Every structure is written in structure tokens, then in C-alpha cells.
Amino acid sequence: MTRTDAGTANGARLIRDAAADVLRDVGLQAATTRLVTDRAGVGRGLLNHYFRWPELRALAWEAIFVEVEGQETAPARALEDWISTAFAPEARAYWRLWLEATEIAEGDPEMAAALGRVQGRLLRGLTDSLARGQTEGCWRCVDPAATALRLTALQDGLAGLLLAGTTDLSPAEAEAHLRQAFALETG
Amino acid sequence: MTRTDAGTANGARLIRDAAADVLRDVGLQAATTRLVTDRAGVGRGLLNHYFRWPELRALAWEAIFVEVEGQETAPARALEDWISTAFAPEARAYWRLWLEATEIAEGDPEMAAALGRVQGRLLRGLTDSLARGQTEGCWRCVDPAATALRLTALQDGLAGLLLAGTTDLSPAEAEAHLRQAFALETG
DNA sequence: AAATTAATTGAGCAGATGCTCAACTCTGTC
DNA sequence: GACAGAGTTGAGCATCTGCTCAATTAATTT
């Protein structure tokens, strides 16, 4: 036994986990197969035995966001949480992964599919929260789906501004902008 | 005379122009020095004699957007133009260039600087238009700068959604969303 | 214990990238 | 016409990329 237990067939799991770690650390663009195999403590060839790089990359990317989606909360409370955690400093890695995915999705069907699934779930959850809040009289809201889309797009755009660091926008201000837009939308 | 006129010293201009063309065609990520020199009809070495790649890339990128900034229009009319051209089909290449720049700006000071300049000018122009429209009574608008930032961020986010192509959002719908947000902001 | 199968390794390939540098071409000057 | 120098060339280097494949090791079966 050298370092891994050959013949045990836990290589695939090691690689999947390491890929997610690497994505979190260096982002989608800078991630390479060598970084992943080294992180997993596994030979270079094993990755290609189980996966192809675009497949593994999309897999690990989606896994990261699926993990975040775990916590579901109350109707109106969910929106407050969504807004207040949107630009938390520890979420920076997620902004980057999100924006990079948007771009990689061009010309990478597997990333496009993964991004579409996560986007769909996020948008659906937000729409539901808005609709339920509306029926419960928390706010008057014309079109939950349209509002959810605009709020998501605004968040993406604000995240892009923060990530580029080319404006004097702070995370706290970004959150305030998101909250203001939410207020305008829900009257 | 082979193909270029050696000794004429128009190489730098040829390369700059070719770089902008290549960026427009294939985007920031896929652009390479070889594509540029081939397009310019110039030897591989000449590019590096005049520029370094990050420098040339940022230069050509900014030149593209400076060219677009040319047309200035009336106070309230400017905003209508901005909204109606934001998602015109022929603007697709610009969305991509814009989003790619956001990401490349991390770890590329020259792109960050170029992006910052263009962002600053765009934001300032939008803020001015909003402020002037406000004093002329076209709308009541609480904070022109904040509204301009939100509208820009929303546009970026919508462009990202369109580019990824992972939702069923159409350019026309994106424009409608931007217009709706504008309406909510200006009351 | 031998044979068979599954799991894993890493040197190496083919392709791309930015960039270097000695050699070359052309223009202008005396 | 020889010289000088700015302008230009492209083969080639160093590095990185995902991926292949024959060889090796471990687990399983006989």
C-alpha cells in the first residue's frame, strides 16, 4: 500500500471531491486535471479513466451549488435570507464560480446543462417564495416569475461589479441595492 | 514587397486594428496572438516587438467600447436609446466581450484598468441622463447614481442569462425587463 | 498458490500558448 | 553604391493543456 488503496475503487469519489475543492479554491478557469489528481492524491491517468474533464468539471460545479441549495426556509423569510446572504464575504468564491460558468457554458454543453439546472431551481425557488408571500399578503407583487428573474439578474450583475473590483462598490452597498430593488418590485 | 511594406512602420496600427477585429469575432478568451498576427498579415514576432499580449488585449478591448460610446444624445432620449439597444441582436458580441472582461480583470491589471474606465464612463453618462431627466421633470428619481448602478447591473445580469442560453429568455423579453425596472425606479 | 480480473499508475504524446532572437528586408543618407 | 538603422520575419523555446496506454499493483476467484 503506497498512498491510496489500489483495487478499492474509491478513486472516483476521491476525484469528485477533490475536483469540487479545487473549483472552490482556484475557480473554473484555472482548474486543471493535474490540480485535481494531485489534490486527490491519485495518479494522473485515473481521472481520465473515470471522467472526461468537461464532464467532471460540470459535475463538481453542480455539486457545489446543490450543496448550498440544501437549506429551505419559510416563505417570506427565505427571501430575506437570500438577500442578506447574497453578498456575504464568504460567498465570493460562489460569485466567481457562477460568473465563470455563464461564460464556459458557451461551447461546453455539460456546463450549460448544469448551469441551466441550477439556474432553474434557483429561479423556481425564488418565484415560489414571491408567490407565497403575495398570497399571504406580505406584499403586492405583479408577476412573481418576472420579479424573480429581475432580482436574480440584478444579483448577478452586482456580483460581477464586485468581482471585477473596478468600482467603489462594497458588498454591503450591493446588498442595499438588492434590497432596494426588492422594495421597488414589491411596492 | 511580399505582402506588407517593411520599413514603413505601420505594423503597430495593423496589429491594433486586427486585434480589435479578432476580439469582436472570437471573444477575449479565445483570442490569441497568432490569430491577431495572421489577421493583420504580419509576422508572429512583430506583435511582441510592439506590445505584450495583456497590454494589446486590453488596448483593443477598450478601443471597441470607446468606439461605441461615440454617439451622445438628448437627456431623456439617451435613456430610451440605451434601453432599446441594450439587447439588440447585433450587440451579442458586446455582451460577451463585456462579461469576459469582468472575469479576465481578475489577475490582469491592464484589463481591470480598461474595464474600470469604460464602466466609469458608462455609469457617469447614465447618471447624468437620469439627473437631467429628473430636473426636467421627466420622472421623479430618488438617487440618479444608485439607479444608474442598478440598471447597469441588471443589464449585465440579463446579458449573462441571454449569453448562457440556459433559460428561455429572449432578447425582447430582456429589454422588457430592463424597461420595467426603469419604470419602477423612476416611479 | 495460481490465475484472473479490477484498479491504478506515470511517462509521454499532440496540441496550443506567449514570447525570444538571430537573421533578414526595406528605406533613407552620405 | 555602400552603409546604417528602423522595421519585420519565423523557426524555435519553455510551458501548459487534456488525454492515452502499456505496465504495475491489489483484490478476487478458482
Image (tube, coloured by chain):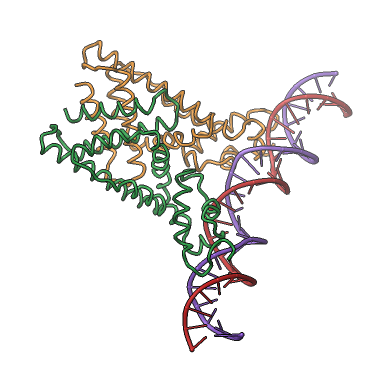
Chain colours: A orange, B green, C red, D purple
- Image height of B7 relative to B185, above or below: below
Quadrant where the C terminus of chain A is found in the figure: top left
Q: Is residue A166 visible?
A: yes
Would residue A92 be found to the left or right of residue D30 on screen?
A: left
- Image height of A157 relative to B176, above or below: below
Would residue A107 be found to the left or right of residue B118 on screen?
A: right
> Which residue reaches farthest top?
A135
- Image height of A120 relative to B86, above or below: above
Residue sitting nearer the eye, B29 or B43: B43
The quadrant where residue D14 appears: bottom right
Residue sitting nearer the eye, A56 or B4: B4
Quadrant where the N terminus of chain A is found in the figure: top right
Q: Is residue A88 visible?
A: no
The quadrant where residue A135 appears: top left
Would residue B53 be found to the left or right of residue C21 on screen?
A: left
Where does the image place residue A158, in percent across and percent down from the top left? 31, 36
Where does the image place residue B87, in percent across and percent down from the top left? 35, 33
- Image height of B158 relative to D24, above or below: above
Instruction: Give the residue displayed 26% in from the left and 43% down from the top.
Output: B123
Instruction: Give the residue displayed 24% in from the left and 45% down from the top.
Output: B72
Where does the image place residue A180, in percent across and percent down from the top left? 22, 30
Where does the image place residue A62, in percent across and percent down from the top left? 49, 28
Instruction: Give the residue displayed 56% in from the left and 31% down from the top.
Output: A16
Would residue A51 be found to the left or right of residue D30 on screen?
A: left
Q: Number of numbered discs present? A: 0
